[in-house]
Amino acid sequence: MKVLDEFEVNLLLDHIKKEKIYLPILLALTTGMRIGEICGLKWSDVDFTNNVIYISKALQMIKGTLTLVEPKKKTN
């Protein structure tokens, strides 16, 4: 798998800075969140006081329908 280096990340962000996709891409690049987790965010998941984002739901396609589900848990 090839990952973007710091120069490439900055180039990408600069190129899309005026696009609607900017914030979801920035979240993915800086937090490691999955796309379904980003799509499942609500404002109540964001704690601005403590600078924390809680992942409470993830958007997933189930039998052709977009559904909010419990997010995947990290397993050891």
Image: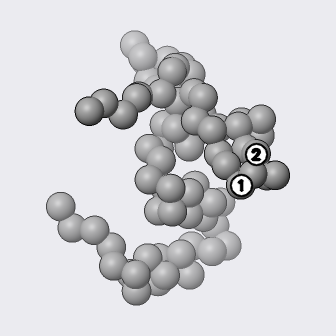
Q: Residue at x 56, y 81 (%)?
A: 14
Residue 49 lies, in percent from the top left, at 81, 52
State how many labels appear. Answer: 2
Residue closest to the far left: 1
Q: Which mark is residue 47?
A: 2
Q: Residues within 10 Å of mark 2 (few under 14, many from 20)?
A: few
Whether residue 40 is visible, yes or no, is yes
Q: Is residue 37 above or below residue 16?
A: above
Residue 38 lies, in percent from the top left, at 56, 43
Residue 25 lies, in percent from the top left, at 52, 60
**Do the residues bearing badges 1 and 2 touch, measured as CB atoms within 8 Å?**
yes
Residue 8 lies, in percent from the top left, at 38, 81
Q: Which mark is residue 28?
A: none
Identified by mark 2, the residue type is Asp
Q: Is residue 18 left or right of residue 62?
A: right
Q: Residue at x 52, y 30 (%)?
A: 58
Label 1 – label 2 distance at C-alpha: 6 Å
Q: Is residue 54 left or right of residue 65?
A: right
For the C terminus, the image quarter is top left
Identified by mark 1, the residue type is Asn
